[in-house]
Amino acid sequence: QIGSRGTVTEAAGFNAEQDAQKLRNAMKGAGTDEVAIIDVLAHRTIAQRQLIKHAFKTSVGKDLIDEVKSELTGNFEKVVVGLLMTAPVYDAYELHHAIKGAGTDEACLIEILASRDNQEIKEIIATYKKEYGKSLEDDIISDTSGMFQRVLVSLLTAGRDESTKVDNVLAVQDAKDLYQAGEARWGTDEVKFLTVLCVRNKQHLLKVFEEYHKIAGRDVEDSIKREMSGTLEDVFLAIVRSIKSKPGFFAERLYKSMKGLGTTDSILIRVMVSRAEIDMLDIKAQFLKMYGKTLFSFIKGDTSGDYGKILLQLCGGQ
């Protein structure tokens, strides 16, 4: 298990060979038994799914992901394929998708890079190189520009201080610097925001945000919204929200992916798949607290078919 606050936990009495056989039976011949696929894959950890993949290849001589791609379609296929990848492989895969082709899915770059810790970022970079033969940094640089690009490059260095040391004097100075870089001047000194938000540790930043409110009379998020726009505003907001509460950050991503007309399935899928084993319990609690409705009810109302079923299993109960 990657974390201790997930809805997906280790299956007891796990047998990779039996699971591989179940999946083979579910996909061979005419038609596909989607329920069997959901029963197995939504209730195994990432580590267990890797063993199933190995057992499948050993007994069938085919790659399970390739088999899934040829048998399933649409959003259901996307969820199942994501579940079969390890965390860094899935993140690298999503980033690669966000960059390649026409246009860039900046929201995906922001969500992943602003919310992963140093170790996770390092693993993503190494995996990206291995899977795609290219440097993630080079690909991001060629696809983005300006200060937004500089923030992403900074996040990619995995250079954030990860200690828990809070320097109160520096926290007050940082808060003043942010205020002077934004609210207190004509135009915004964005580099100052980058330096403080991308480098300081979490505990220190929480203190900075507290001091900032005292000086500015408003939250740092409000100032970022007033002072900036576009992708730069989005990335700084994501960093602040992720620092304040990672589960809250993801709860908001889920809410925005489903509220209003239509569903942004790419976001819904990515968050449900990538957080299921880490902090989905906390995300659900935050969702209820922030929006007064359960995540389960939201997903149920917004999705259907096998796609809806597998997401509800990952959501885990009401």
Image (tube, helix red, strand yellow):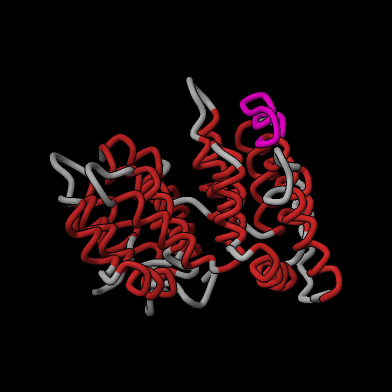
Residue at image point 61% right, 37% down = 131
Residue at image point 34% right, 60% down = 41
- Residue 137 is drawn in which quadrant? top right
Q: Nearer the viewer, residue 132 or 160?
A: 160
Which SS type dominates the magenta stretch? helix
Coordinates of residue 165 in the picture (x, y in percent): 81, 76
Relative to 164, is 183 above or below?
above
Residue 143 painted magenta: yes
Relative to 51, is 61 above or below?
above
Relative to 75, is 101 above or below?
above
Residue at image point 22% right, 43% down = 261
Q: Is residue 300 left or right of residue 148?
A: left
Coordinates of residue 190 in the picture (x, y in percent): 73, 42
Q: Tell me if I can see residue 10 in this picture.
A: no
Coordinates of residue 119 in the picture (x, y in percent): 70, 59
Residue at image point 60% right, 53% down = 223
Q: Please state the extent of the stretch shown in magenta in the rendering.
A: 136-148
Q: Nearer the viewer, residue 61 or 172?
A: 172
Q: Is residue 316 left or right of residue 238?
A: left
- Residue 291 is drawn in which quadrant? bottom left
Coordinates of residue 85 in the picture (x, y in percent): 48, 51
Q: Tell me if I can see residue 52 in this picture.
A: yes
Q: Is residue 210 left or right of residue 280?
A: right
Residue 92 painted magenta: no
